[in-house]
Image (tube, rainbow, N blue to C red):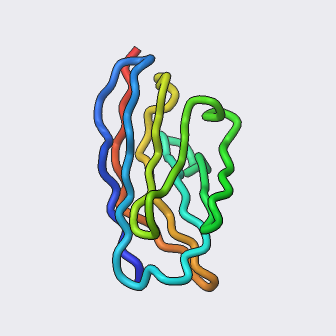
Amino acid sequence: QVQLEESGGGLVQAGGSLRLSCAASGSIFNINVMGWYRQAPGKQREFVATITSGGTTTYANSVKGRFTISRDNVKTTYLQMNNLKPEDTAVYYCKARKPLYDYWGQGTQVTVSS
């Protein structure tokens, strides 16, 4: 089992920045990919960014150039969000991918006011 806890969400004005953190605990060995996803009200959960154990990153087109995913060790993954827009408002979830199962956190709310 892997436990994931997100933090860092909040209310920010358009153009502002936030940094989300995802702390992993439990059986954290064999985590291949860490990712961030988001779900806005009335919409499906969507991909935001991922980072592999080797450091390769991938971003959704909507956040490319504004968001940066990083990890400082196997336990903590970050999402630096700059130049935030109202359409970035959503609950942001952290995901850990292991060979046989994906684990999700409970999410953290990000609200961007115009």
Q: Is residue 6 above or below residue 19?
A: below
**Apparent side of residue 44 relative to residue 89 in the rendered image (left or right):** right
Q: In the picture, residue 90 is in which quadrant?
A: top left
Q: Is residue 36 above or below residue 18?
A: below
Q: Quadrant of the N terminus?
A: bottom left
Report the residue at 65% width, 34% height from top: 64
The x and y percentages for residue 95 are 50, 64
Decide if residue 64 is in sight here: yes
Residue 34, given in percent of the width and then of the height, sits at: 54, 63
User: Which residue is nearer to you in this view: 55 or 45?
Assistant: 55
Measured from the top left, where is residue 5 in percent x and y?
32, 62
Q: Quadrant of the C terminus?
A: top left
- Relative placement, left or right, of 3 versus 48 is left
Please determine whether, in this image, residue 49 is positioned above or below residue 73.
above
Q: Position of residue 16 (x, y in %)?
A: 39, 21
The residue depicted at 38 percent of the width and 58 percent of the height is: 22
Q: Nearer the viewer, residue 53 or 92?
A: 53
Q: Quadrant of residue 77?
A: bottom left
- Figure disc tally: 0
* Closer to the camera in the image, 3 or 53: 53
- Answer yes or no: is residue 41 visible: no
- Residue 59, quarter of the rendered image: top right
17 relative to 58 in the view: left or right: left
**Residue at the spot 41% in from the left edge and 45% down from the top edge:** 91
Question: 78 or 99: nearer the eye?
Answer: 78
Furthest residue toward top: 114
Q: Residue at x 37, y 52 (%)?
A: 21
